[in-house]
């Protein structure tokens, strides 16, 4: 269903207008804007089994922002056939149209986390002229309309780019209410910040929101990891850049999950040169409110996979025609217990989506930020010791069952139950908190990353640059688009170690 983008003609005949002028402190405007945006495809994903209104509202604002940015937005909307079976309303396409060649409409038989699977499908359908691919969550906004030009500039030097430096997690009042500030994962890599979940109270490197790759590089890693049926693929991707994906797989999961994640992550680490061959944009993003953050861990997502011993090899199929992933269909010749287990997996995932309560604007828990005088320590590049049963060097080929000539889907034979697993720190898989960072690179301020493009380095005076972020947290109001000094920022006396669920859940 929907369009095959590669079969469309005159793809750019009605491209949106180029972005309005905006003052930046980056590379000169004339040089930046010489890049051809027609080579950049921006993909965003919409799937909403509970039909939260905020999701659709954010998408409409995001689409308008992409139009202002002068980029071609490709929207993939997926609806689910099985919603009524779980007490949810029937689904219809809400933000896409079948006659719009920039929209892809898909119908999935099972309610799963679909984001990375849908991104892969969109990239496969793009016309060949697109050299660069970005995938961006539909609930964010860039603070500079130069971001697409900066993206192409960085992609000409690096195969993988995270599209922001600092993110602002907003409350229901919007830009007047900043609940937390997080630096990007790649900023943290390039500036040798601690990437260690045990130290998230000091520094939280955000692994999600917005990424871009050269299309050739995207294809070389065979797309994003797409068997994460409860999410966390952003986290896997980010740690794979450092050849540390094993740290993102909790103990107790089926060994298939661990083995296939490691297998997928190896070419990512090779491409990224263990973090040396990646970059970020020296601009900020706003992340708009869609529900209390703690609600997103009301049902522990990892517990679902552990409880049912989810195996991507045995419990996931891919449709030949659509490339959509799904749980195996009920087998009339199969064991009743196995059919019930598959049904229970989907039911638990549905309960997780329901628990997010994304339209709630009444109950707000403000995350307590760590003290601003936290002593910074050097980034540790070595991996913690991880002990697992079995030999991870012997990895089964493939990620999920491949397509076959007869059409439909199929599953493979069940592998043995996983051996006992052990890892030093289970908090590896939990967002423990964030650093209380403040504004940087607003449109009219002088930034310490002025030489980001002139000398091939990122943010020369880092310590002074971050000192600004750590010591500017007074309460204020009336935030404008071009500045963050007027903010309702909340600072606590310390870090409360609240469990905020796995990184990358904001989509």
Image (spheres, helix red, strand yellow):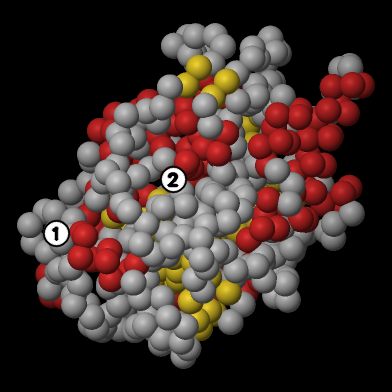
User: Residue at 64% across / 45% down in the picture?
Assistant: 113
Label 1 SS: loop
User: Hey, which quadrant is residue 50 in on the image?
Assistant: bottom right
Residue nearer the viewer, 85 or 268: 268
Label 2 SS: helix
Whether residue 408 is visible, yes or no, is: no
Where's residue 160, x and y in %? 30, 46
151 to the left or right of 314: left
Q: CA distance from mark 1 to mark 2?
A: 24 Å
User: Residue at 47% across / 41% down in the picture?
Assistant: 198
Q: Which residue is labeled 2 in the image?
A: 199
Where's residue 441, x and y in %? 27, 73
Where's residue 399, x and y in %? 54, 25
User: Residue at 70% across / 58% down in the picture?
Assistant: 295
User: Residue at 24% across / 83% down in the picture?
Assistant: 444
Q: Which mark is residue 208?
A: none
Q: Quadrant of the C terminus?
A: bottom right
Q: Is residue 258 above or below residue 72?
A: above
Where's residue 433, x and y in %? 51, 54
360 to the left or right of 323: right
Q: Is residue 428 above or below residue 470?
A: above
Q: Is residue 317 above or below residue 453?
A: above
400 to the left or right of 340: left
How would you rate the neighbour count of disc 2 (Cα within 10 Å): few for under 14, some for 14-19, many for 20 or more? some
Q: Earlier in the sequence, mark 1 or mark 2?
A: 2
Q: Which mark is residue 460?
A: 1
Whether residue 187 is visible, yes or no, is: yes
Q: Are marks 1 and 2 in contact (CB under 8 Å)?
A: no
Q: Nearer the viewer, mark 1 or mark 2?
A: 2
User: Hey, which quadrant is residue 381 in on the image?
Assistant: top left
């Amino acid at each position: 269903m929907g369009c095959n983008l590669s079969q469309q003609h005159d793809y750019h005949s009605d491209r949106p207008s180029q972005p309005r002028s905006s003052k930046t402190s980056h590379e000169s405007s004339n040089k930046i804007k010489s890049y051809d945006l027609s080579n950049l495809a921006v993909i965003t994903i919409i799937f909403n089994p509970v039909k939260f209104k905020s999701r659709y509202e954010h998408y409409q604002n995001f689409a308008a922002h992409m139009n202002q940015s002068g980029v071609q937005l490709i929207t993939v909307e997926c609806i689910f056939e099985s919603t009524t079976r779980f007490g949810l309303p029937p689904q219809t396409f809400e933000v896409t149209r079948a006659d719009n060649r920039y929209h892809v409409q898909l119908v999935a038989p099972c309610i799963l986390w679909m984001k990375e699977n849908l991104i892969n499908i969109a990239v496969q359908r793009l016309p060949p002229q697109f050299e660069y691919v970005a995938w961006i969550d539909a609930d964010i906004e860039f603070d500079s309309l130069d971001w697409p030009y900066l993206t192409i500039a960085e992609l000409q030097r690096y195969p993988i780019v995270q599209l922001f430096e600092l993110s602002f997690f907003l409350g229901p009042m919007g830009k007047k209410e900043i609940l937390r500030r997080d630096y990007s994962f790649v900023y943290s890599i390039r500036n040798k910040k601690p990437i260690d979940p045990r130290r998230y109270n000091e520094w939280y490197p955000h692994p999600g929101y917005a990424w871009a790759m050269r299309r050739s590089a995207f294809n070389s890693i065979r797309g994003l990891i797409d068997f994460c049926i409860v999410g966390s693929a952003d986290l896997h991707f980010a740690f794979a850049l450092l050849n540390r994906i094993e740290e993102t797989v909790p103990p107790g999961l089926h060994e298939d999950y661990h083995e296939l994640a490691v297998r997928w992550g190896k070419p990512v680490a090779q491409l990224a040169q263990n973090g040396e061959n990646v970059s970020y944009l020296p601009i900020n993003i706003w992340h708009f409110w869609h529900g209390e953050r703690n609600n997103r861990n009301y049902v522990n997502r990892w517990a679902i996979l552990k409880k049912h011993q989810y195996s991507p090899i045995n419990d996931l199929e891919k449709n030949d025609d659509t490339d959509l992933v799904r749980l195996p269909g009920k087998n009339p010749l199969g064991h009743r217990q196995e059919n019930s287990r598959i049904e229970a997996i989907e039911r638990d995932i549905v309960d997780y989506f329901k628990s997010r309560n994304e339209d709630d604007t009444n109950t707000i828990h403000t995350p307590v930020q760590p003290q601003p005088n936290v002593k910074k320590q050097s980034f540790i590049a070595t991996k913690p010791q991880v002990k697992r049963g079995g030999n991870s060097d012997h990895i089964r080929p493939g990620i999920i069952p491949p397509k076959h000539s007869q059409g439909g889907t199929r599953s493979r034979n069940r592998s043995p139950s996983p051996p006992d697993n052990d890892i030093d720190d289970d908090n590896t898989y939990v967002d423990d908190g964030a650093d209380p960072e403040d504004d940087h690179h607003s449109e009219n301020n002088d930034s310490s990353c002025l030489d980001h493009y002139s000398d091939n380095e990122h943010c020369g005076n880092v310590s002074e640059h971050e000192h600004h972020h750590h010591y500017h947290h007074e309460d204020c109001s009336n935030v404008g688009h071009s500045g963050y000094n007027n903010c309702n920022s909340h600072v606590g006396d310390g870090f409360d170690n609240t469990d905020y669920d796995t990184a990358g859940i904001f989509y």
